[in-house]
């Protein structure tokens, strides 16, 4: 997706992380930490199932990119570790506080960079719905919480 400022309100508690020259990070991407570097959600290795991919993202989730890092440009990118963001979603109704995690692509091979879907358990989530949607919608307000820095939605014991 193109660079889209998805932040709507709330404290973002930003951090900066390095990005290598081969990695493209767009504004609005869900970002995870691997090897000390920031990566967009879709760059993570396919683990076989949607739930496994969602859990892997959850476990290393830093937040939402607030800056762009183009190909061929090593540097740093600012990432919001909290706040409310308007993210794309499959058409559905969403309840206030409902857990959401990264949605998977149609081929079932990777999670999407800027799209979330309802999930059943906290270990798959990157946040919770911040505005109830009783009618089906393809955009949802999500309060994201970094797992890495803020102990966002966690796995059940």
Image: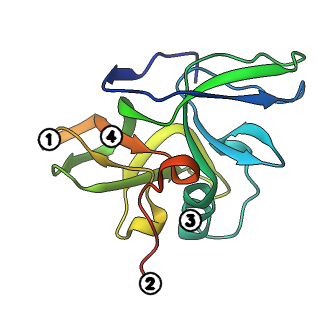
> How far apart in space, not on screen, are marks 1 and 3 (Cα)?
25 Å
Q: Please say if the residues under marks 1 and 2 sit with CB atoms less than 8 Å apart.
A: no
> How far apart in space, not on screen, are marks 1 and 2 (Cα)?
30 Å
Q: In terms of sequence position, does the residue under pointer 1 or pointer 2 come before the other?
A: 1
Residue at mark 1: 133
Task: Give the structural element (helix, strand or loop) at label 4.
Answer: strand
Residue 157, disc: 2
Q: In terms of sequence position, does the residue under pointer 4 or pointer 3 come before the other?
A: 3
Count of marks overlaid on the render: 4
Q: Position of residue 122 (x, y in %)?
A: 39, 66
Q: Please say if the residues under marks 4 and 3 sit with CB atoms less than 8 Å apart.
A: no
Give the label, 4 or 2, closer to the camera.
2
Residue 55, disc: 3
> How far apart in space, not on screen, are marks 4 and 1 (Cα)?
14 Å
Give the label, 4 or 1, closer to the camera.
4
Task: Give the structural element (helix, strand or loop) at label 3.
Answer: helix
Q: In terms of sequence position, does the residue under pointer 3 or pointer 2 come before the other?
A: 3
Residue at mark 4: 143
Q: In terms of sequence position, does the residue under pointer 4 or pointer 2 come before the other?
A: 4
């Amino acid at each position: 997706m193109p660079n889209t400022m998805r932040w709507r309100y709330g404290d973002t508690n930003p951090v900066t992380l390095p990005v290598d020259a081969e990695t493209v990070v767009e504004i609005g991407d869900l970002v995870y930490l691997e090897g000390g570097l920031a990566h967009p959600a879709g760059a993570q290795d396919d683990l076989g199932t949607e739930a496994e991919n969602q859990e892997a993202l959850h476990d290393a989730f830093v937040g939402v990119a607030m800056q762009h890092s183009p190909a061929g440009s090593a540097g740093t990118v600012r990432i919001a570790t909290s706040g409310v963001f308007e993210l794309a979603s499959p058409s559905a109704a969403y309840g206030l506080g409902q857990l959401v995690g990264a949605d998977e692509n149609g081929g079932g091979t990777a999670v999407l960079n800027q799209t979330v879907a309802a999930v059943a358990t906290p270990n798959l989530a990157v946040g919770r719905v911040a505005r109830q949607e009783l009618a089906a919608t393809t955009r949802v307000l999500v309060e994201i919480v970094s797992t890495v820095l803020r102990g966002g939605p966690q796995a059940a014991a």
